[in-house]
Image (spheres, grey):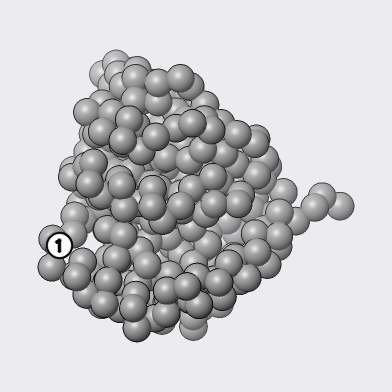
Amino acid sequence: MKHDILEDIIAHKQIELQHQKKAVPLQTLLGLASEAMDRNTVSMRESLENSTCGIIAEFKRKSPSKGWLHPKAKVSDIIPAYQANGAAACSILTDELFFGGSLGDLKKARRQTSLPLLRKDFVLESYQLFQAKAMGADAVLLIAAVLNPEDCEILASTAHTLGMEVLLEIHRAEELECLNPYVDMLGINNRNLGSFDTQVNHSLDLLPAVQAYLEKEKECTPLLITESGIHNPNDVIRLRQEGFRGFLIGETFMKTANPGETLRSFIQTCTNHAD
């Protein structure tokens, strides 16, 4: 049996959260978040709907499965390049131990771009939503594999109260039970978070179950997003034809010397082939 990486991540995240709450108590964090409330957030959903490519370009320095991708990557170099080269939104990994990120990266990214920013992390409690708001996030990721439906709805509702959109990530059909009316975007992760194995066709395999569920739960109308394992522009074209409107891509860009230029070439190929 393969080692379950997700279990390690969550165990460490729980300890990390306790340290963070001691260092920055909730009351202090509430003050920081309240200062950020005046900022006009940018709708990630609308940006993806209006984009011809729908690329959510991710900033991450490493992954648990591949190790370091771009250890010296700087937000100030890459995020402006992502915007200049056609990204519809940016995803910022804020987990430090497993992905080499930080909340500071999110804060810096907010200063560097007008694109919608997604805080990508393993959100377990509302404290992390206030962190995201204080650091300038427009949207937050909720992962169904680590939440139950009740907690997911509470977190999604809280995110909306804070003016942020919600991307709910699933990997199995059973996790659709975590979907609720506060979810703006539904992402199918092509990566198994336990083994970190990736199959890009997983989004297409799971799509019929998603469509059937949405037909039944008509109050839920999320935009469909596919995440991870997308290395070929042809995958984007094919998935877009099936109804996906957002494509979260990180490793394909971040493993190169110039992620922004790689994004530009990727989008150009998508455009040429689509024509």
- Residue at the image point whose x is 13% and y is 60% from the top: 40
Q: How many marks?
A: 1
Residue 118 placement, left or right of 152:
left
Query: From what the image shows, is residue 90 above or below residue 213?
Result: above
Q: Residue furthest front?
A: 23
Q: Position of residue 25 (x, y in %)?
A: 42, 79
- Residue at the image point whose x is 61% and y is 49% from the top: 98
Q: Residues within 10 Å of mark 1 (few under 14, many from 20)?
A: few
Query: From what the image shows, is residue 205 above or below residue 255?
Result: below
Q: Secondary structure at mark 1?
A: loop
Q: Quadrant of the C terminus?
A: top left
* Quadrant assignment, res 182: bottom left
Q: Position of residue 94 (x, y in %)?
A: 46, 53
Query: Does the image show residue 209?
Result: no
Task: Tell which of 37 and 150 is nearer to you.
Answer: 37
Task: Tell which of 106 and 271 is nearer to you.
Answer: 106
Q: Position of residue 173 (x, y in %)?
A: 57, 62
Task: Tell which of 110 and 40 is nearer to you.
Answer: 110
- Residue at the image point whose x is 22% and y is 28% from the top: 84
Query: Does the image show residue 64?
Result: yes
Q: Position of residue 112 (x, y in %)?
A: 23, 41
Residue 262 placement, left or right of 256:
left
- Residue at the image point whose x is 65% and y is 35% from the top: 66
Amino acid carrying label 1: it is Arg
- What residue is disc 1 on? 39
Q: Residue furthest right?
A: 1
